[in-house]
Image (tube, grey):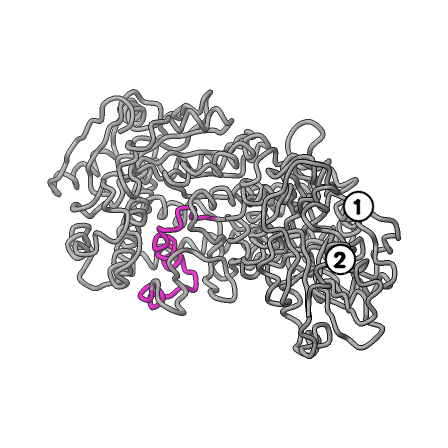
Amino acid sequence: RTQGTSHLVNIDDEMHQQSIIFSLINLSASRSQYLARRIHYNAPTYLKMKFSMLAVAATAFAAGVNGFSAAPRASFGIRQASSLKMADAATEVDKMAALATAANEARGLAMDSIAAAHSGHMGLPLGCAEIGATLYGSQMQYNPKDTTWINRDRFILSAGHGSMFLYSWLNLAGFDLSIDELKNFRQHHSQTPGHPEFPNSEHTTPGIECTTGPLGAGVSNAVGFAVSEKMAAARYNTDEHKIFDHHIFALAGDGCFQEGVSAESACFAAHEKLDNLIVLYDSNEVTLDKMAEYTQSEDIIKRYEAYGWETYEIDGHDLAVVEETIAAAKASNNGKPKFIKCNTIIGKGMEETEGTNAAHGEAGVPYVDKARAAIGLPEEKWFVSEGTRDFFKGVQEKNAKIYADWQATYSAWKEANPEKAAELEAAVNDDVMPAEEMMKVIPEMGTDAEATRVSGFKVIQEIAKAVPNYISGSADLHGSTRNYINDGGNFGAGFDKSYAGKNLYFGIREHAMGAILNGIAYHGIFKASGSTFLVFVDYFRPTIRVASLAELNRVSYILTHDSIGVGEDGPTHQPVETVSGLRVIPNLDVFRPSDAEETVAAYVSSVTRKEGPTALILSRQNLAQNNDVPAHERREGALKGAYIAKKETADLDLIIIATGSEVQHALAAAKDMPGARVVSMPCMELYERQSDDYKESVLPSTCTKRIAMEAGVSAPWYKYASKVVGVDRFGFSAPGDIVMKELGMSAENLASEIATMN
């Protein structure tokens, strides 16, 4: 299809098909090997046969395609055809026939649901049905009755627009996702939203491992899943008991591989030898606007080989080949992630649109009834045959045996390793000590001026002790962001790295870092943070948005060099709009502490919060400590988002609100103002979640004379103050203290602005 000449053999007569089934079973070994070589990867031409799916199954099976061994550059060596008993052959044909039937019924479920909604994306569910049948009907280990089993294989639909693919297969595979929910596709309060959503307060759809939709994100999240599995295996498996040995599967399309984040993540995955990752590329040669050739001409197989992946190229509609290739990929523990290019026909089965960009969305809705009939489905909508239900009961029984065996292994492992077991179970259950208790075990930080990134380095050591499943990484900036965990070891392959390491080196790949962190969080064992300069957060802002939407409390972001105080590097590296840009993301806590003790509270909050992620905004330059307030009071106050950093000594007539590096200026300006109260507000979002009584005690409504100060854009602060001293322009290159002073970030300027207020 994509190399050389395609040869199409049409065998349409049903009687001829039936006779071919039985005759092919008895093909000679030499003839079988010849046919096998013609239809598999790396052949000079591709033999395409338009059989009934039953005949395809029989053909592939009779051809002796029993397994592959990876040869150099991932060519396939075909095993010698086995001497098969007729009963074995018939059993395999029955299995392939059942998978083929399930594939067509999954197509029907997708068509019916999208037609009912008059909305959705039909192309992928129809084009990848054989891939779904193989994964859920043969190659993945899972338990629909325990959807949080820690050693289940994970499936991520990176091309999230094709969500009816996933919902259809979850229903067929026995997950608690009813036909009624499929009928309610894309409707309010249904369990089948337009794009898959990780279980959260809005949707709790079982079997969804990852929120996807933004292209390239899911396949990059999958790298994070693979990291987490490797790390869990290294930490918890023993010579006697293996409790982690699952695979990560991701299905992605052309759009995912055009987005740059997938390239960043692919490089990381290959470099760290994540051979537990299997990516299936739905190569249908179509994008939304045009055929794919209009915007791409690369050889993606060569690109992934250059990264260091093991690559395969197959006919994505040939059930036997799809199954054997995935099995081969699973069995290949050679230190290379796997990339399977599945050549498919988008919208397969709907002749009016198949193979064209019109098949991508719901353009095929008018042709649904005709297409259903053409693939042999009855008039009954959302039809699933008893045979398919029975087949998947058998799949569930097979997986239940795997699950039961694993439970026995786990019980023996737990008895032999009680400390490891307690640690793992606490990690899985996200069981950490309460924030107030955690703050008590962290020593006081000292009284000397200090950059909050330096304070953060001290705090993260204590966090790593208190939370054993806490890990951290950086986009090539550990030396500046100061989030390296001492004695934690480095994660990865080669050099001084191991898969048990707590420190991740992402390279200069911020977008991949964000996606991988989310994947680690979705996997459900570790708490992960990642660092870069604040000004570079926009490289991975989309991943923060999805983490907030998905309520991923296991992830946090350490963002240093937080303002124009960066100085000499100039405006390209001096964030002014960036903190406020993060504050507008719903369900993201943005913490900008003013000193070391507030930094303690910020880190503690980030690992104890249950509802979503946290961004920690830390300074490059030294900040004065507010030593007039005891350390525990600063910690406790910061944990509420805002507190009184200096109480008035006369009748209250002014409130100064500040955050981060500007709190020191507010305290200095208010020093000779007996009626002035200074409020430190390190986290607006936390403050807003406090009781009305607490908020009134900090910012009493009776005092309307308020001024706010922050070295960033002023707009967000008008919610709390009538006047704001901010920075509503880009900075310039000069020493940081000069930039700060020139742009009004000083106690003197704040006092001058206060003097102008009535």
Left or right, 167 with reference to 225: left
Q: Which of these two is toward me, 551 or 648?
A: 648
Range of the magenta residues? 155-184
Quadrant holding the N terminus: top left
Q: Residue at 19% of width from left, 50% of height from top?
A: 375
Left or right, 679 with reference to 286: right
Mark 1 falls on what kind of element?
loop
Q: Residue at 72% of width from left, 41% of height from top?
A: 736
Place of residue 227 in the rendered image (x, y in percent of width and height, measured from the top left) = 59, 41
Residue 38 in which image quadrant: top left
Q: Which of these two is toward me, 669 or 475?
A: 669
- Magenta-colored stretch includes residue 179: yes
- Magenta-colored stretch includes residue 127: no
Left or right, 452 with reference to 268: right
Q: Which residue is tagged 1?
A: 622
Tell me whether the residue at label 2 lies in contact with that at label 1, contact meaning CB atoms closer than 8 angstroms: no
Mark 2 falls on what kind of element?
helix
User: In whole angstroms, how far apart are the C-alphas of marks 2 and 1?
Assistant: 13 Å
Question: Crowdedness of circle 1 by 10 Å Cα count: few (<14), some, many (20+)?
Answer: some
Residue 245 in which image quadrant: top right
Q: Which residue is tagged 2?
A: 663
Place of residue 27 in the rendered image (x, y in percent of width and height, measured from the top left) = 25, 29
Is residue 518 visible in the rendered image? The answer is yes
